[in-house]
Image: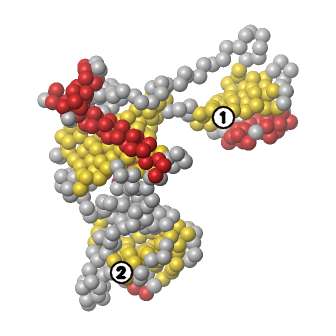
Amino acid sequence: MKQLISAAGRLVRQFPRTHLLLSMVLLGGVILIAFRPDSTETAPERVQAISLPERTAPAPKPQTTSKPAPATPQWQTLTVQSGDSLSSLLHPLGIGAGQIDALLKGDDKLKRLTRLRPGEALEVIVSDSGSLTNVRYHPSKVETLTARLTGGGWNVRLSQREYQKQTRFAQADITGSLFLAGAAAGITDRLTMQLANLFAWDVDFALDIRKGDRFRILYEELYLDGEKVGEGDILMAEFWNQGRHLTAFRYETLSGDVEYLNIKGDSMRKEFIRTPVAFARISSRFNLSRKHPVLNRIRAHKGTDYAAPSGTPIKAAGDGKVIFAGVKGGYGNVIILKHGQIYTTLYAHMRSFAKGIRVGKRVKQSQTIGYVGSSGLATGPHLHYEFRINGVHRNPQTVPLPKARGINDNERAEFLIAANRLKAQMTLFSEASTLASSDVF
Ligand SMILES: [Zn+2]
């Protein structure tokens, strides 16, 4: 620990004082500490930023506009106006349909040129003899499509610039909802959602959140030419929930799949998600001797009810196959999914089914299968959800869920190195934030 603190201290000393403002915003008991790229950014008062060393490659050189010798034809920039097509843009330069046809047939990648949008720029070179010889176009902020006419036809290249990535740190105590805590920590709803999805198999965000729960994350911010253009993925997340400590590491497998794993290399995903409706409120629990609210007599409640606004998407709890989609008495519109040999899940009182959902259809975990409603015997819009093993009803909130496959044995060593690197970074950021805060107060 001592070494870590001094490492963090060394690190902090490496950076100019002005970058060492601390953000410590007390928002209804929520303590947040967020790091930002620079202190001039609009942020709550007394926000400060700390930069940690980068593990990413230096920024790629900005594209230089070519400066051809006076004799050679010049690049011309054509700006796409509303209603423009490739031919209407090129026609004034004397480029006819024949040349455009040959260009578009030159390579599949050039099909992008048929989907030009207003405001975009198309750069071209037209030779003295009136031939289109070079085309340059940016289908997106990071892509450049270049085409050059050679003796053998069009030579086409689609290159992609890499985002510069900065690792950021955020943490918050949860006193209200996860979203409030996320907002207080300065992260976007998209990132909070990613965080929630990461732990969705272990934490029921409708039910399990307690005062004193907290999280901290490392995530990526994406930059182009020094300008922030968005957020990347969560790299590592820790969640303290009712005394449990959950940790997830982002890992890209050799086959290029991105997985979130715990330190043992087990997938954070399970074969089933715990809650098939995002951020709903539990309105009735699994209870074998409940008095039915509509029938008003004792009738076992063999599932969990999630109250949510009508129309809220309902997600498949796991990969599976639709074995029933229709009306079932008091259950109203019902979908039953079969997962493997022994599991089935049931979703009742739906307002409607998602498009394409019918018996025999395969669904993926978290795929929207329908929408919350109050069809059948229901006092208000909610999802009635049942989980069965070998036909026996189990409490969806507490039934042990089988895990999805984890890391391959041949990648375990590699994963551990990556995970421990992230862990060390998390500690460093965390120590630096504590250090910086004690500096100010
Ligand atoms: Zn129910």
Residue 127: % across, % down: 81, 21
Q: Which residue is mark 2?
A: 393
Q: Which residue is mark 1?
A: 158
For the C terminus, the quadrant is top left
Which residue is pictured at 38% across the width and 75% down the height?
387
| Residue neighbourhood size for the residue with mark 1, other residues' Cα within 10 Å, grouped as few (<14), some (14–19), many (≥20) | some
Mark 2: which secondary structure? strand
Q: Compared to 390, does 173 lie above or below?
A: above
Viewer-proximal residue among 173 and 101 = 173
Scheme of colours in the image: secondary structure
Mark 1 or 2: in front is 2
| 60 sits to left or right of 232 | right
Amino acid carrying label 2: it is His
Amino acid carrying label 1: it is Leu
Residue 194: % across, % down: 39, 50
Q: Give the mark nearest the N terminus, 1 or 2.
A: 1
Q: Compared to 243, does 14 lie above or below?
A: above
Q: CA distance from mark 1 to mark 2?
A: 54 Å
Residue 257: % across, % down: 51, 49
Residue 234: % across, % down: 39, 44
| Residue neighbourhood size for the residue with mark 2, other residues' Cα within 10 Å, grouped as few (<14), some (14–19), many (≥20) | some
Q: Residue furthest top?
A: 70
Residue 59 visible? The answer is: yes
